[in-house]
Image: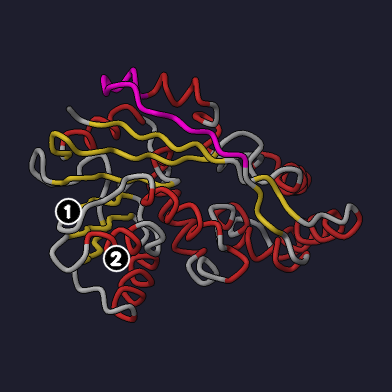
Amino acid sequence: MNDLNTPQAKAAAAYNAASDLFDHPANTFWDRFGRSTINRLELKPGASVLDVCCGSGASALPAAEQVGPGGRVVGVDVAEKLLNLASAKAQNQGLDNIEFRAGDMLDTGFADASFDAVVCVFGIFFVDDIPAAIRELWRVLRPGGKLAITTWGPDFFEPANAVFWNAVRDVRPELYKGFNPWDRIAEPAALSAIFNESRVPEPLIVAEAATHPIVSPEDWWTTLLGSGYRGTIEQLEPAMVEHVRQANHSFIVDRKIQAVQANVLYAVAEKL
């Protein structure tokens, strides 16, 4: 984690920077898909849940609601500023059955069979060795428990995504698509193959076609700043940022874009 070029370090830098707009009303997709993931697990009162790459609590907080006072949820992330947001939200909601801590999904530090459910929403792709991460999450899962991994499907944020990256290429060609690790597992077959390589039983994979509304060009820019794209934007000089912003603004206006694709893959594997 000390190497600034690791995917985990890049993710930490990007999402710490994005924390100021991560929970902006323009970015409702975090809560939407986080809660949807938890609802697929049918958590029982009193259950224990580990949520890695928990962000600001989009899946961890619904999990804490569902397992109730007798349950336990642990949220882990590499971005400490997002963990601070999550802790504040838990306190505001009166959820005292949840804790947040900095950590690495490749080495969680928990004993074997510690949790009834393990969740990773939009995060499993932030390591080079995805099968190793899945094996670690499987290790801490109890028999009878479920592992839920949610990732982005194909054509993420299109048609505006391509406009963003093309504008970045105009000013910093070496940064072009330098932060889109989810592309590796955007198709069900690719995600299934990763599970097979992990030696984890075949999951049930559900592909959901979805969109995310774009109310205005400003909201689209806020979505970029409040997500992993922030890491790329932070590497640009002010004039370069303005070029990228203007390219995106013009595209949204000229094409009258009102939504972008937000397709999702849900994978759930049960440990017998």
Mark 2 — residue? Answer: 65
Provide the secondary structure element on which disc 1 rests. Answer: loop
Q: Is residue 259 magenta?
A: no
> Looking at the image, which residue is at 41% across and 60% down?
58
Give the farthest residue toward the left. Answer: 111
Is 19 left or right of 156, judged from the image as shown? left
Q: Nearer the viewer, residue 254 or 145?
A: 145
What is the x, y in percent for residue 134?
A: 29, 32
What is the x, y in percent for residue 42?
A: 30, 48
Q: Is residue 253 above or below residue 51?
A: below
Is 70 left or right of 207, judged from the image as shown? left
Q: Tell me the crowding category of disc 2: few under 14, some 14 to 19, or many 20 or more residues within 10 angstroms, Cα based.
A: many
Q: Nearer the viewer, residue 152 or 35?
A: 35
Magenta range is: 195-209
> Looking at the image, which residue is at 41% across and 19% down?
193
Q: Nearer the viewer, residue 28 or 224?
A: 28
Total of numbered circles in the picture?
2
Residue 254 is drawn in which quadrant?
bottom right
Q: How did the renderer colour the structure? A: secondary structure
Mark 1 — residue? Answer: 47
Asked if the residues shown at circle 1 and circle 2 are in contact, with their CB atoms under 8 angstroms apart, the answer is no
What is the x, y in percent for residue 57?
A: 37, 63
Give the alpha-carbon distance from disc 1 to disc 2, as whole Å: 11 Å
Provide the secondary structure element on which disc 2 rests. Answer: helix
Residue 217 is drawn in which quadrant?
bottom right
Callout 1 amino acid: Ala
Is 193 left or right of 158, judged from the image as shown? left
